[in-house]
């Protein structure tokens, strides 16, 4: 199972640039779960405790507008991830996420991340750097579109 998780991590945008030894460390902290089409992964306002890595299937993230209509903010597929801020701090989710196809997700908890920091600070530091790069890119992209 660990080897299968490592192969999937190598295809994930957040983890693909990390070296094999770091992926092996992280793989031990990953849990794999299946979500049927239509199943809510998390609700807006929930406390964020997990980073979700899409192994297969598709997820959509949405918010409800003033008219109580769903407004889709993003769609995620294999290799994507959602909820990365849960690793940094357990804060409330800003939107709802649900499976729009049967999906297999890899879950990495805030607690597991804290354990990784204690047990393998080098691996945790590499992961934090990758998260920072992605967040920096997102901020730059938002500034361009404004």
Image: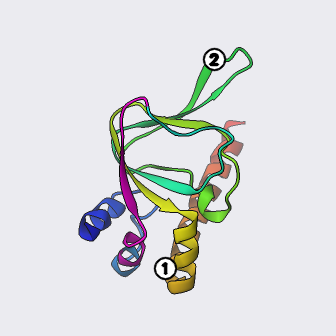
Q: Mark 1 highlights which residue?
A: 123
- The residue closer to the viewer here, 36 or 5, is 36
Which residue appears at 58% of the width and 70% of the height? 128
Residue 37: quarter of image:
top left
Query: In the picture shown, does residue 46 fall above or below 89?
Result: above
- Residue behind mark 2: 69
- Quarter occupied by residue 136: bottom right
Residue 127 visible in the snapshot: yes
> What is the C-alpha distance between the residues marked 2 and 1?
42 Å
Quadrant of the frame with the C terminus? top right
Q: Residue drawn at (48%, 62%), measured in percent from left and top?
A: 108
Q: Residue furthest top?
A: 67
**Which residue shows up at 52% across the image and 77% down it?**
116
Residue 16, position as x, y percentages in the image: 39, 64
Left or right for 36, reference 137:
left
90 with respect to 121 (left or right):
right
Does the stretch in magenta take in 55?
no
Q: Which span is picked out in magenta?
A: 24-38
Quarter of the image holding residue 9?
Answer: bottom left
Where is 136 relative to 21, above or below?
above
């Amino acid at each position: 199972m660990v080897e299968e998780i490592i192969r999937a991590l190598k295809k994930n945008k957040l983890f693909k640039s990390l070296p094999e030894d770091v992926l092996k460390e992280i793989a031990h902290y990953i849990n794999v779960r299946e979500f049927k089409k239509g199943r809510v992964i998390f609700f807006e306002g929930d406390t964020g405790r997990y980073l979700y890595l899409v192994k297969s299937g598709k997820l959509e993230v949405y918010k409800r507008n003033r008219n109580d209509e769903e407004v889709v903010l993003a769609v995620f597929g294999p290799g994507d991830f959602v909820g990365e801020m849960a690793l940094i701090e357990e804060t409330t989710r800003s939107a709802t996420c649900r499976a729009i196809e049967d999906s297999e997700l890899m879950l990495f908890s805030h607690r597991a991340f804290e354990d990784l920091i204690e047990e393998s600070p080098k691996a945790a530091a590499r992961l934090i750097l990758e998260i920072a790069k992605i967040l920096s890119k997102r901020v730059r992209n938002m500034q361009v579109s404004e």
